[in-house]
Image (cartoon, grey):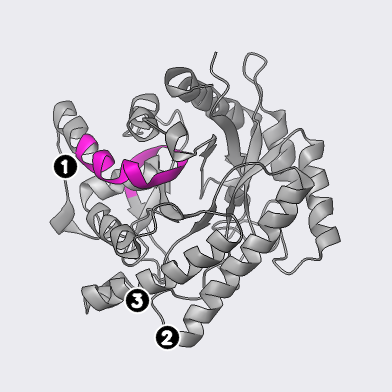
Amino acid sequence: MPSLPQLHNAMWPGLVGKGGDEPGAEPAISLDRMLELTAGAEVDGQKFDGIDYFLFLPHTDPDASDDELKAIADKIAGHGFKVGSLVAPVWPGTVGDSAMGDEEQQKKFLLAVEKACRIARIFNEHGVREYGVIRIDSAEFGVNTWRENPKDNTKRIADTFRQAAKIAQDNGERLAAEGEICWAGMHSWKDMLTLLETVGMPDTLGFQADLAHTYLYLMGYNAPEHALLQEGYSEDEFYAAYKEMTDALRPWTIDFHVAQNDGNVHGSGSHDKTGKHCPADDPNGKLDIVKCAGYWLEGASERGIQHICWDGCMFPNAMLETPATWNTILDAMIKVRDAHGWG
């Protein structure tokens, strides 16, 4: 059986869309509890190998001391886990700000990447982290603002990303830009490709493909002019479109999320539509997870990928607290590795 890619679970579903003051908002789930839930999953004697990790409160203070970060590393390793990819706190309200913004906003964005690189170094030196990237996005929800001057706004994001990539390069890290339709300049597969090519640092800045989010690229949500499919598509049409998208973005793909999507989009506040993750066995799921993963994982080892991660943002807490949820997810991950793994 293949031993790679290693199978990771994301910690941020315990945070994303949680907490806050909105009516009905669910409380965040602690890092300790997310680790326990992940460690509890088991399918035919196989377990998760590690976690991917968001570098912000309440899970992590991005300014935590070296000793505090080593204690977190000890805790994660105590469950038998490795740390893989880290999510830099690039958004307004965390450390960072818009990559499309003014000089002050750009400085905040770059500071977030610096802090992420520092934490990565501590985890690497500890030994709990041996692979993975640092994830970023444009931290700019203003897709319509971007449209006012697409060329210059993409140039601005690319300039920020290029400076961020140099910081990562100096720290022996790579950055992966998450393909999701709510991020300005990254909101369609074509605009994402243009941005990556404009940055032009493929060894240091690549793409993070998420099965749920990239499905919405096909449908042209937020960019109808780049749609590759229309509602009512046939299976043959789907896979022809999927091949076109993955052929374009796969050479840049250095981080990969297994996920499912039911075709719905939702948004809140300044988010201009975003993808909805749903359970791996959701009867409304649009994706054959194993088959679609294969399009992205072709040649993955040559691009330095050593792990894949499940992403289930926006799951209700009751679903996250149910052990069967994680066993179903782990089973899907194992099937992806059995079909497309190596090592």
- Judge by depth and name the residue closer to the eye, 149 or 155: 155
Query: Which label belongs to residue 156?
Result: 3
Q: How dense is the environment of label 1, judged by Cα within 10 Å: few (below 14), some, or many (20 and up)?
A: few
The answer to whether residue 56 of the structure is visible from this angle is no
Of pointers 1 and 3, the one earlier in the residue sequence: 3
**How far is the residue under mark 3 from the one under mark 2?**
9 Å
Kind of residue at badge 1: Glu
**How far is the residue under mark 2 from the one under mark 1?**
39 Å
Kind of residue at badge 2: Asp
Q: Mark 3 and mark 2 in contact? Answer it, CB < 8 Å.
A: no
* Residue 25 quadrant: bottom right
Q: Nearer the viewer, mark 1 or mark 3?
A: 3
Q: How dense is the environment of label 3, judged by Cα within 10 Å: few (below 14), some, or many (20 and up)?
A: some
Location of mark 2 (residue):
102
Asked if 93 appears above or below 247 in the picture, the reply is: below
Label 1 SS: loop
Asked if 188 appears above or below 289 in the picture, the reply is: below
The answer to whether residue 193 of the structure is visible from this angle is yes
Q: Where is residue 301 in the image (x, y as percent from the top left)?
A: 46, 32
Q: Mark 1 and mark 3 in contact? Answer it, CB < 8 Å.
A: no
